[in-house]
Image (cartoon, rainbow, N blue to C red):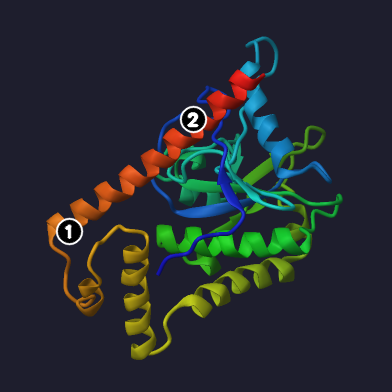
Amino acid sequence: MYFHTPYSYLNYLTPNAFSRPGRNRKFTRGIVWHWVANANTDERMNRNYFEGLKDQSGVGTLIYASAVSIIGFKRIICNMADSEEAFHVGANNYTEVGKRLMEGCRNPNQSLMGVELCHPDWTGKPDDLTYKLAVSWGAEKATAWGLNPLTDFYLHGEVVLDKDPATGKLSPRGCHRYWIDNPQAWAKFKKDVVDYQNSLRPKTVADQEMWKHDAVMGMHERELITSVDWAKRFNEPSPLWFDAVTNNRLYDKMQDQIDELHKQINELKAAK
């Protein structure tokens, strides 16, 4: 089963010490959901904030912050590859859940994927499109990484504890604010992700056969395979050479698109 979230595009951060260290996580034990904590700021503005952290001078308090993706009002920005470590759950104090999730790691950034959600006001409640994008994104990543949304999705406040400077008392961080304040809405969101996953799964043997057939025909339409005969043999294991050929063709197509994009960028620069 393959999910592709609509309105999602790559705009990777520049590798740097403060927001994109450029190393992969050691594990992927779950996904942590955050609010951007800045009302009515969109995905582009928050992505640019993470990008700007690279320009810190090293004087004073340094900020380390980022997320794999930002789910905004109109689209999703991917800040780095899904496998990369982002700076989103580093802290001095962790809940028992956080301690469990960071076993074998320096901190939970090495074991948890992080995502930020934009919100129109200070309640933190996502608008309708942001919510729908979050459901789709959550289903896609849970499926890709073998995670259960009901047990492997976490709020920031379920992982990290903050210390009150006056009393020294530890309490869960108030992020994602809306779902922290409305636990029934958080439970519904996780169930909506599971329901979306289930809605796209083949329900019967006939559905499964049609799904396999359509997948093979899709590869033919995209010229990754040259013969429709493969559509009659979709239950057969593919030989190594078949995987190698289709992967090489896919790589060539992606490289052609990249080359064309670079050409357009250079033409725009020359026009200026």
Q: Which residue is mark 1?
A: 242
State left or right for residue 152 relative to residue 204.
Answer: right
**Whether residue 135 is situated above or below residue 46 in the rendered picture:** below
Mark 2 vs 1, N-terminal side: 1
Q: Work out whether residue 222 can be spotted.
A: yes
Quarter of the image where one finds residue 215? bottom left
Under tag 1, what secondary structure?
A: helix
**Whether residue 48 is situated above or below residue 191 in the rendered picture:** above
**Whether residue 216 is situated above or below residue 225 in the rendered picture:** below
Give how far across and how far down residue 258 sits, in percent.
Answer: 44, 37
Give how far across and how far down residue 175 sits, in percent.
Answer: 71, 49
Front residue of this view, candidates 109 and 48: 48
Q: Residue at x 56, y 74 (%)?
A: 196
State left or right for residue 149 relative to residue 61.
Answer: left
Q: Amino acid at mark 2?
A: His
Q: Which residue is mark 2?
A: 262
Q: Amino acid at mark 1?
A: Phe
